[in-house]
Image (cartoon, rainbow, N blue to C red):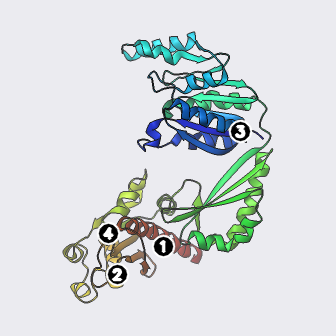
Amino acid sequence: MKNAEIIAVGSELLLGQIVNTNARFISQQLAELGINVYFHTVVGDNPDRLLSAIKTAERRANIIIFTGGLGPTKDDLTKETIARHLGKNLVLDQDALESIELYFTRTKRLMTENNRKQALVLEGSHILPNNYGMAPGMVLETNGNTYMLLPGPPKEMEPMFRQYGCTVLASKDTVNEKIVSRVLRFFGIGEAALETEIMDIIDAQSNPTIAPLAGDGEVTLRLTAKHVDENVAESMLDEVEKVIRQRVGQYIYGYNDTSLLAELTGVLKERNLTITAAESLTGGLFQKELTSIAGVSSVFKGGVVCYSNEVKHKILQVEQETLDNDGAVSEQCAFELAENTSRLLAADIGVSFTGVAGPDELEGKPVGTVYIGIAIKGRPTVVEKLTLGGTREAIRNRAVKYGCYFILQNLKESQNAI
């Protein structure tokens, strides 16, 4: 097996001015080629530190992929540093120069002399054309290592790697196994609890491997299998997933890059159901996230942000007695909000959010108290009470996810009852 290390060059990455999405993209592409990636490195625009990073990478990888530092300015020094390290000259690539000149002609911009620098390439390297920018990429094989240099802007790097970089790496016959991954997405169970339930499976892992990851109130498991036959690798993942589902399948809601909102929207479309929302605690966050999904207009009727008791009473017809005796942060208020919003907007489902996001308690209720009402046509209305921790923003975000999760669970139960 060949091992790769990705080195992203650019002080702007270290300063947090931009996010290093290139490393993620390249790692995904290399996984499909069966090439291991064990290290990501980020280094600023400094030749000494870049040289140190290269020497370190050479000790632990035989494919080193660089992104960034191929531009026309003085701080673009990737190929200069590599050339000096490997004892190679930089030579002018005529095709690259003509492509750069054509780019300036096409965009009707004046080409300055320093742009010629972008046409300099490592002597003896294989050139990767840049169809979406100016600086070409290049691949050089020497001393048993493969050095691949790619531009930094993702709009240039990604198509270059897909069209040319992958072909070069695949043609070297360096890949014997395919790496296939699958992500299982969980909600309603914490990372520690999930790990406890499947600890023996994790301890026994070798191929496939299992990697837990928590974030944004959710937990994921990345399953990864290696085999020369991709179909066999997929079957290996199926077997592991089957065992995991027997333990904690009730918490799995989807795969890979999906989300609770995306899954909910899909179920609503599939079952031709409409939904509406009454939001106090979340201030419209549920509706904002829902309407960010393309095509949701076919299932989303609209909703009301009912932050004040006046709106709860006058618009959503919550009983004044409920607000006076139980309060806005109560099971009864959440119940009426969910039922009334579904009735008033003629939707199949009404969901309500009320609670205390903080920083102070409200109506004698502590921060993190949340009530979510769910009214589904043909089923009894239910209210789920939660006690959530974290910041004001975290409580609101998690409440929205719990709302989606509870609706999905109720729809699943109703489907099973048919």
Q: Nearer the viewer, residue 6 or 55?
A: 55
Q: In the image, which is nearer the foreground, mark 3 or mark 2? A: 3
Q: Nearer the viewer, residue 365 or 75?
A: 75
Residue 333 screen position, x and y as percent: 31, 81
The disc, 4 or 2, on the residue closer to the chain's N-terminal end is 4
Rounded to the nearest angstrom, the CA distance separating label 4 from label 2 is: 19 Å
* Helix, strand or loop for disc 3: helix
The disc, 1 or 4, on the residue closer to the chain's N-terminal end is 4
Q: Amino acid at mark 2?
A: Pro
Q: Quadrant of the C terminus?
A: bottom right
The residue that label 4 is drawn on is: 279
Residue 104 screen position, x and y as percent: 41, 15
The residue that label 1 is drawn on is: 406
Label 2 CA crowd tier, 10 Å (few <14, some 14–19, many 20+): some
Q: Amino acid at mark 4?
A: Glu
Confirm whether residue 187 shows in the render.
Answer: yes
Q: In the image, which is nearer the foreground, mark 2 or mark 1? A: 2
Seen from this angle, which residue lies furthest front? Answer: 48
Rounded to the nearest angstrom, the CA distance separating label 1 from label 4 is: 16 Å
Q: In the rendered view, would you say 162 is above or below 189?
A: above
Q: In the image, which is nearer the foreground, mark 3 or mark 1? A: 3
Q: Is residue 239 left or right of residue 54?
A: right
The residue that label 2 is drawn on is: 366
Label 4 CA crowd tier, 10 Å (few <14, some 14–19, many 20+): many
Q: Quadrant of residue 352?
A: bottom left
Q: Quadrant of residue 305?
A: bottom left
- Which label number is shown at residue 59? 3
